[in-house]
Image: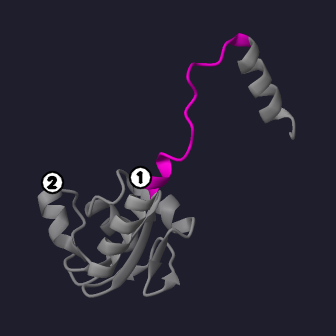
Amino acid sequence: MDRLRIDKWLWAARFFRTRSLAKAAIEGGKVHLDGQRVKVSREISVGDHIRVRQGWDERDIVVEGLSDQRRGAPEAQTLYRETDESIARREQSAQARKLAGGMTERPHRRPDKRERRQIHRFRDWDS
């Protein structure tokens, strides 16, 4: 096998739990191949550079192997290699999020019924 659909490969490499989630991410612009947005049916080959955004993280990966079958995580990790810059960037952003988490003040208790109503009114105010 020398070419494979990108949605199948992302599913087999365990970036997404289902092919439909992989498809939704591709259609939502969260997956780029060589700097370009792709369609679900785009075929990839070994050596392609893919950027995948999942939540807060963005990974730059190089395709090392192709598989259309979903297997265990150790085998799935052999299908790609994450670049060193991507790993450093993810670790730096995770550290920044961790440090920023202490800046927000947490409530001392849960809101009571009256306060919940006020919160719901405030949230629904603009709609």
Q: Image quarter for residue 104?
A: top right
The furthest residue to the right: 126
Tell which circle, 1 or 2, labels the residue nearer the N-terminal end: 2
The furthest residue to the top: 113
Q: Name the residue under label 2.
A: 72
Are the residues flagged by discs 1 and 2 in contact, CB closer than 8 Å? no
- Say if residue 83 shows up in the picture: no
Q: Nearer the viewer, residue 105 or 93?
A: 105
Image position, residue 55 (x, y; %): 47, 57
Q: Nearer the viewer, residue 102 or 114?
A: 102
Mostly what secondary structure, the magenta segment? loop
Image position, residue 66 (x, y; %): 22, 75
Relative to 31, residue 110 above or below: above
Image position, residue 33 (x, y; %): 43, 82
Residue 106 drawn in magenta: yes
The 10 Å Cα crowd at callout 2, few under 14, some 14 to 19, many 20 or more, is few
Q: Name the residue under label 1.
A: 98
Relative to 66, residue 127 above or below: above
Span shown in magenta: 97-113
Task: Please report the residue visible at 33 percent of the width from the left and 65 percent of the height from the top.
Answer: 91
Q: Image quarter for residue 47?
A: bottom left
Give the quadrant of the C terminus. Answer: top right
Q: What residue type is labelled 1?
A: Lys
Image position, residue 8 (x, y; %): 34, 65
- Say if residue 61 shows up in the picture: yes
Secondary structure under the numbered disc 1 in the rendered image: helix
Residue 110 drawn in magenta: yes
Task: Please report the residue visible at 23 percent of the width from the left and 74 percent of the height from the top.
Answer: 80
Q: Which colour scheme is used?
A: one colour
